[in-house]
Image (cartoon, helix red, strand yellow):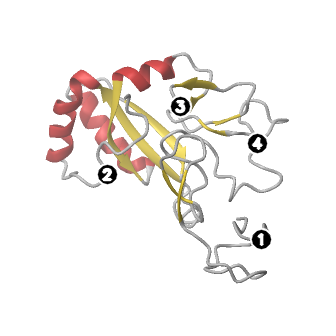
Amino acid sequence: MICNNCGYKVQGTPSTCPSCGNVMATEGTCGSCGNPLDIQTDIYCQACGALNPNLTSEEGIVCDTHIENRAVGYCVVCGKAVCEECLETAGNRLICDDPQHRTFLNDWKVVYTFDFEYEAAMLYANLEQNDIETQAFTKPNPDSSEAASLPTRVEVLVPKNKYEEAIEVAKMLGLTGDDSNESSTEGE
């Protein structure tokens, strides 16, 4: 993280800068899309996929496709790290070069977000059993303060016209409210 007062490169997430004593802000906005961003812990913006420059190391994050290139963000659909060479944009959101991802942004909706793949598998299987087409994507956890214990998050998506049905299935499984439909994958 970089102190917004003196420019000192601060290690970790202290409440004050060790160089100048400046109180380090935590609330901020994404420089790419303007959405809220915790500048001390969010590695990337969940809304648009852009990397948080305050937490990106000098080596940076490597692109998943072009390992010789630094990534500029993550695909908001699948979570793949993308560089300038392979990224696409959909509005102000970053997506990888998979042509289906534009369809997912426009025509699909996140039913629920999980911390673990085995939890997502339960909902996925139940949705498929109810003849609801389903996709699941495992993404890097955007919150670096939780990265050691929760390295990923898993989003389960369904076509928008099946969303209400899918929510009913989720409710039957005891999944309610907090993590349903809170993803940047949903189209505008």
Q: Is residue 42 left or right of residue 172?
A: right
Indicate the quadrant where residue 111 lies.
top left
Name the foreground residue: 135 vs 21.
Answer: 21
Q: To which residue does mark 3 refer?
A: 92
Q: Residues within 10 Å of mark 3 (few under 14, many from 20)?
A: few
Q: Which amino acid does label 3 sit on?
A: Asn
Between disc 4 and disc 3, whose residue precedes?
4
Q: What residue type is labelled 1?
A: Cys
Q: To which residue does mark 2 refer?
A: 179
Residue 64: % across, % down: 71, 35
Pick the quarter of the image with the N terminus. Answer: bottom right
Q: Which mark is in front, 1 or 3?
A: 1
Q: Which amino acid does label 4 sit on?
A: Val
Q: How crowded is mark 2: few (under 14 residues within 10 Å), some or many (20 or more)?
A: some
Name the foreground residue: 36 vs 61.
Answer: 36
Q: Which amino acid does label 2 sit on?
A: Asp
Q: In this view, does 46 lie above or below 94?
A: below
Residue 93 seen anywhere in this rendered image of the structure: yes
Real-space Cα separation, disc 4 to disc 2, in angstroms: 29 Å
- Cβ atoms under marks 1 and 4 closer than 8 Å: no
Between disc 2 and disc 1, whose residue precedes?
1
Q: In this view, does 101 lie above or below 40?
A: above
Q: Which residue is drawn at 59% across and 49% down?
A: 44
| Residue 62 image label | 4
Q: How crowded is mark 4: few (under 14 residues within 10 Å), some or many (20 or more)?
A: some
Q: Which residue is drawn at 73% across and 65% down?
A: 2
Q: Is mark 1 on a helix, strand or loop?
A: loop
Q: To which residue does mark 1 refer?
A: 6
Real-space Cα separation, disc 4 to disc 3, in angstroms: 21 Å
